[in-house]
Amino acid sequence: MSGDETTLRGDVLALEGVSVWLGGRQILDEVSFTLAPGDFAGLIGSNGAGKTTILRIIMGLQEPAEGKVLVDGRRLGRRNRSVGYVPQKVLIDPDAPLRARDLVALGLDGERVGPRIPSRRRRQLVDEMLEAVDAARFADARVGNLSGGEQQRVLIAHALISRPRLLLMDEPLANLDIRSGQEIVDLLARIACEQHIAVLLSAHDMNPLLPVMDRVVYVAGGRVAAGTTNEVVRTEVLSKLYGHPVNVLRVDGRVLVVSGSDVSLEAVPRQPQPGRPAAEATGRRGGGDV
Amino acid sequence: MGGVVNAVFAPGFFHSDPVRTALIAGAIVALVSGAVGVITVLRGQSFAGHALSALGTLGGSAAFLVGVSPLWGFLTSGVVVAGAMEAVGTQRRRGRDVATGLVLSTALGLSALLLYFDTIANSTTGVTITILFGSLFAISGITVPAMILLSLVCLAVLALLYRPLLLSSVSAELAAARGIPVRALGLAFLLLMALSAALSSVAVGTILSTALLIGPAATALRLTRRPAMAMAVAGAIGVISTWAGIVLAYDSYHWAPAGKGWPVSFFVVAVIFTLYLVADLGTRLQAARARDRRTGSPAAAQPLATVRSS
Ligand SMILES: Nc1ncnc2c1ncn2[C@@H]1O[C@H](COP(=O)(O)OP(=O)(O)O)[C@@H](O)[C@H]1O
Ligand SMILES: [Mg+2]
């Protein structure tokens, strides 16, 4: 069901027929999709759809029963520096003696054995990375004391400092207020564009991503539909994916996926965001992106 | 000047062999406990640390019975318990507390029996006190080189694993994402904790060794934001506490009621706790002052203040 199977794009990520069983239940059924450098993709699906499982498979934290995962055309090794990962729940003790810059530095060489030799170059790299995610202000604060949005920035810097080709983020917006969430999304879109890396971001609500998302990987019933937003978020495509009729409604620039047979909403609309004029659902990182 | 020195350090302090041994052993143990303690607190494994040393009672009392240094008993039981914890730890969380509690109390019950045999064999109750509450003055000079060696091993492994250990303590998921073998590393750290618990049990006993592990670490977390610095500060606090404890205990030979000296472990733990209270109070005051400064003059410019004044 993937939008295009062309491998000519120089894919940074390719899943080919990936199937996964967990606890005797099939979670993913022959999942295939690709991402190219610079893609900003949303991994969309309701709770329990299998988004985290897909990300863990890509990271090599879990083995698929069938199929393969190619990053930059190669199978994942155990030590993979070309994929950065920000898990959903990273709970850091407020008392932990760990500054934001320490956590970012651990992204550079946290797996290395032996004492760390401090160098100007390392420090400079860390400073640059903190600057790039707009986290320089709280570089010396304890990570555990930072707000959710600030911690996300530090974790993004941690994941990006080893210069991966692909960044995976698991539900980064789940615990953020709308405004901080929007800031994170804008930051990621900018990074994907500037550093020419692919970003795959999971979310149960696609609406905050619509203005910047190039591609959608929609997960339901263990299968995915992938392509551009316009290709995937359509009544026919999603009805086929869900295996029952659903309606894709566009209201006020927001997309709602509604079960066709009754009125139960898959995505409940929230109040329109103040100060954010209705963004077009079609927006492919429109014109002057901040 | 000389009077002050004499008042603090009772006559003979610097010429006593047991005192010298106690100062050396105390310092070694404190350095290791401080460094291991910071990671222990960071990983939220304080209870595991306590269980490791409490279960050391069994090994220590058995060692006494067969006539070897309790250090080897503490060490053996620590390694066994660390292995068992790893096995249990991977099972589901439900029931783990119950299993741990049951094993802990059974082992302590068995220890009570062995300690009873020890006292009969030696016709003294000193053994029980030494195992449970330690005695820095009773450490035999022969044990010290072994303690130094084990401490060096422990500190070297800690330095080697520093970065992966730190990352996996902050988040196992982040560590796994970087290809760090989280589970093997967890076992390695349990073994380091067992080693550190064995060393501190020789100094302050199996029950109080947790104080040396957690106390200085908790204080250090208040004082610094840097991980490596926290380990060094915790070590330093531990050394200060044990040395102060030794001085006070030596002085207490002239105190009531018996003139036989108060237990040195009491003083060590008392100093550790006092330092923690002082550091805690200090950081609280500092935080309050910082809050005052922030809500001080700039608040006048905020709309809330305007509303109140109108
Ligand atoms: N270790 C596991 N054992 C059994 N089932 C699991 C395991 N991990 C996840 N699952 C199941 O797999 C499904 C997908 O989970 P997940 O990928 O976490 O979903 P999402 O991230 O989209 O909310 C869920 O139904 C979940 O219950
Ligand atoms: Mg999830």
Image (cartoon, rainbow, N blue to C red):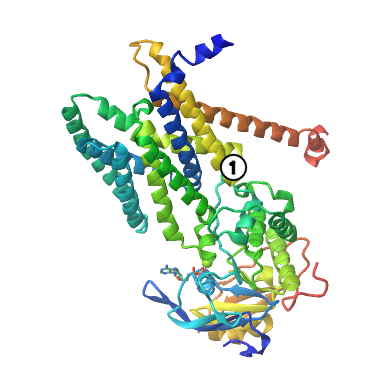
The percent coordinates of residue A248 (x first, y second) are 63, 79
- Residue A185 in picture, x, y percent from top left: 69, 66
Place of residue B292 in the rendered image (x, y in percent of width and height, measured from the top left): 72, 32
Residue A41 sits in quarter = bottom right
Which residue carries the number 1 mark?
B229
User: Is ligand 2 less than 8 Å from the beta carbon at label 1?
Assistant: no
Quadrant of res B127? top left
Percent coordinates x, y for residue A152 in the rendering = 64, 58
Seen in the picture, residue B40 relative to A47 is either above or below; the reply is above
What's the amino acid at mark 1? Met
- Residue in front for this viewpoint, B207 or B130: B130
Q: Circle 1 — which element?
A: helix
The answer to whether A260 is drawn above or below residue B56 in the figure is below
Is disc 1 surrounded by few (<14), some (14 to 19) or many (20+) residues within 10 Å?
A: some
Residue at 63% x, 89% y: name it.
Answer: A7
Q: Is residue B180 visible?
A: yes
B33 in relation to A1, above or below: above
Instruction: Name the chain letter of the residue that bears numbered label 1.
Output: B
Residue depicted at 39% across the width and 50% down the height: B191
- Describe residue B69's horizontal placement relative to residue B26 as left or right: left
Q: Quadrant of residue B224?
A: top right
Q: Quadrant of the N terminus of chain A?
A: bottom right
Give A183 or A256, whichever is nearer the viewer: A183
Who's the residue at 50% across and 58% down the image? B172
Of the 4 image quadrants, the one containing the C terminus of chain A is bottom right
**Left or right for B160, reference B61:** right
